Image (spheres, helix red, strand yellow):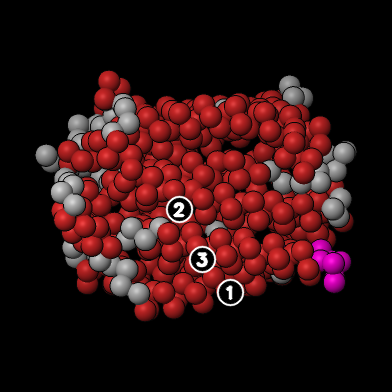
Amino acid sequence: MEESKSSVLLTEGAIWRKMIAFAIPIFLGNLFQQLYNTADSLIVGNFEGSEALAAVSSSGNLIFLMVGFFNGISLGAGVVIARYYGAKKYDIVEKAVHTLVAFGLVAGVALTVIGMTFTPHILRLMGTPEDVLPNSIVYFRVYFAGSLGFVMYNIFVGILQSVGDSRHPLIYLIISSMMNVVLDLLFVAGFDMGVGGAALATIISQFVSAALCLVRLLREKNAYRVIPRKIRFHGQMFRQIISNGLPAGVQNSIIALANVVVQSNINAFGADAMAGCGSYAKIEGFGFLPITCFAMALTTFISQNLGARKYDRVKKGAIFGIVCSVTMAEIIGIAINFFAPALIGLFNDESQVIQYGVSQARTVTLFYFLLAFSHCLAGIFRGAGRAIVPMIVMMVCWCAIRIAYITVAVKLVPDITTVFWAYPITWLLGAVIFLIYFLKADWMHTFERREARQKGNGGN
């Protein structure tokens, strides 16, 4: 079977050229996705005021708590697809694709029910102020009504990126981003629909981008083509997907839970703190873009090259990706640190709101290099089939230790800056542990050992 012209086989050619060519569309795609996520806060903050801004801009942690598990499973499936695509085992790629789509359909429906049912209870547990709670409930319920759209979008993008196609997801994101901004202005500024209109604009845009990805996969002529009548759970393949994706899914949910605890402590300082820190979170999303794009590129690169058993290429690619991500993340962190007052002021011009946002930016941005390093190593280990490693490291450092720190430190020093320091401290711990494992462990031969065990047990 021939390779698609839109896919990129990362097992051949100059490493730096292939990785950058694959990473740039991911970067631009994530940039546009962050732009249309930020559009909600910008438009709501300027047309509806600080309480509505607090409801929208503080949404990230709760949304990630709800969707992170399913996205983790999707990430695990991408590793499986990339590995078999690199090994040119296209019959197995086909089974993986259709199993993943079946999972996405079930997950999207489940998330809709869970999100719409439990949102009010979770928001109250988070200590959301009473003056913000009604808007928060409306925003989240409308958002989760469109769960199927953003779950399937992530599923389809995961399939395309696992075979090296990062260009088409970028095109679809640009289209949906522009649509989201137009609909935000129409629903919020034009029809005065408030935070519910902002959420509605987002989910419509997500469904459009998911539909565009689906059309692409339906028309594809290669192994990763989606054929509706073949959508089903293949038992052996589903077990592989779960074994690779469950650690990432659990990790995402646990980290999100820890961040919800952090958000709860921020909520205790009132609506201005929620609005200011939520505004910084939107800006931070742009700072994390090089981190995200190189981590995702590394996962696919490592998977494909280990599938092809090109170990020297794996080592060189890992080092190149880490250096690029860490350097870019720190440059962006320094820029955000310097321009923080002006950037936070774009969302709301109230001095107290700006003060809270700037305080968080000035505390954490210079430590972005630690976060970049950890995410790159996590992406490498996932691509090597060792997803359990980042799960354990992040659960311990970014969840257990972060919550323990918050619980103790805030009581001793009841200042919001104490809350902010939870991030750099736990990033440092995680980075040190990842580095030790990267240097000491034999993580490159995981797939070979698994295949040998399967053959020994009579499996395939």
Closer to the camera: disc 3 or disc 1? 3
First-in-chain label (3 vs 2): 2
Residue 231 sits in quarter: top left
At x 59%, y 67%, the residue is: 397
Residue 334, numbered circle: none
Quadrant of the image containing the N terminus: top left
* Magenta span: 410-420
The percent position of residue 168, horizontal first and vertical second, equals: 36, 40
Query: In front here: 27 or 278?
Result: 278
Tell me whether the residue at label 3 lies in contact with that at label 1, contact meaning CB atoms closer than 8 angstroms: no
- The three-letter amino acid code for the residue at tag 3 is Val
Whole-angstrom CA distance, mark 1 to mark 2, is: 21 Å
Instruction: Looking at this view, name the residue that lies furthest to the front.
Output: 457
* Residue identified by numbered label 2: 247
Mark number displayed over residue 428: 1
Nearer to me, 18 or 399:
399
- Residue type (three-letter) at the residue carrying disc 1: Leu
Tell me how far mark 3 sits from mark 2, CA to CA: 11 Å
Q: Kindly identify which residue carries mark 3.
A: 393
Q: Residues within 10 Å of mark 3 (few under 14, many from 20)?
A: some
Visible residue check, residue 201: no
Secondary structure under the numbered disc 1 in the rendered image: helix
